[in-house]
Amino acid sequence: MDLAHMKSELSKRLSTGRYNHVLRVTETAMRLATLHDVSVKKAEQAALFHDIAKCMDPTSLRILMIENKVDERLFLFHHELWHASVGALIAESEFNVKDTEILNAIKYHTTGRAGMSKLEKIIYVADMTEPERNFPGVEELRELAIDNLEVAMEACIRHSVQFLVKKGVPVFPDSIDCYNEHVMKRGIVN
C-alpha cells in the first residue's frame, strides 16, 4: 500500500479534524503494536482505514451496506456504527486490502466483538485512547494499554458499554458479547 496515496485519499474524504484523528490513532496503534508483538504494518494499515467512511452521509452508508449484505442488525442502531463496516468494504474494494485480520480490525473498531484478534484490540484501544481523547478515565486506559492489552481492552469495552447505558441508548450485541467475554475471562461469573 502506498502510504502517501492513502493519506491523500483520506484527506479528500475526511474533515481536517477527522483526518488528524486518524493520524493520531495510527501513531498510537503502531506504538501499541510494537509493545504487544503485533505487525506494525498491519496496525498502520488498519488504523489508517478505520474511519475512511466516517464522513459519509447515512444514506450513502446505508446503500453500500444493503448492496454488500452487511449485518442487518446495524440498521436497528445509530448510524454512527455504520462507518466501520463500510470502511472495511472500501478498504477491500477500492484499495485491494485482502488481509482478513486488517479488515476485521476496521470492521469492529466501534463495537468490538467476542474473539477479537490482538490487532483488532489494538485498533479498538488506539481509537479510544489516542492523545486528543479527553474524558474521565482516559489516562488510566492509556496506561493499561501500555502494560496489558487484554486488561486495556476489557476496560475500554466496559467504559464504552457504561457510557451507552448512561445515555440510555441501545448497545449493539457485538459489544455486549465482547464485554461478556472479557468479564468471563477474568472469572467473574455467578
Image: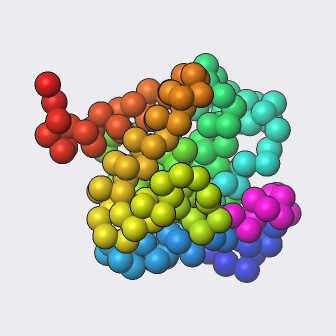
The answer to whether residue 29 is above or below residue 136 is below
On the question of residue 137 being in view, the answer is: yes
Q: Quadrant of the N terminus?
A: bottom right
Percent x, y of residue 107: 53, 46
On the question of residue 44 being in view, the answer is: no
Looking at the image, which residue sits at the far front? Answer: 136
Q: Quadrant of the C terminus?
A: top left
* Picture quadrant of residue 133: bottom right
Percent x, y of residue 148: 29, 65
The answer to whether residue 107 is above or below residue 120 is above
Looking at the image, which residue sits at the far top? Answer: 76
Give yes or no for residue 15 being in the magenta stretch: yes
The answer to whether residue 170 is above or below residue 155 is above
Residue in the picture at 39% in, 79% down: 34
User: Could you tell whether 72 is left or right of 59 in the image?
Assistant: left
User: Could you tell whether 119 is left or right of 1 in the image?
Assistant: left
User: Could you tell whether 91 is left or right of 140 in the image?
Assistant: right
Residue in the picture at 55% in, 58% down: 127
Looking at the picture, the colour scheme in use is rainbow
Along the viewing direction, whichever of 172 and 151 lies nearer the viewer: 151
Along the viewing direction, whichever of 10 and 184 lies nearer the viewer: 184
The magenta segment: 12-22
Residue in the picture at 49% in, 45% down: 108
Residue in the picture at 50% in, 69% down: 29
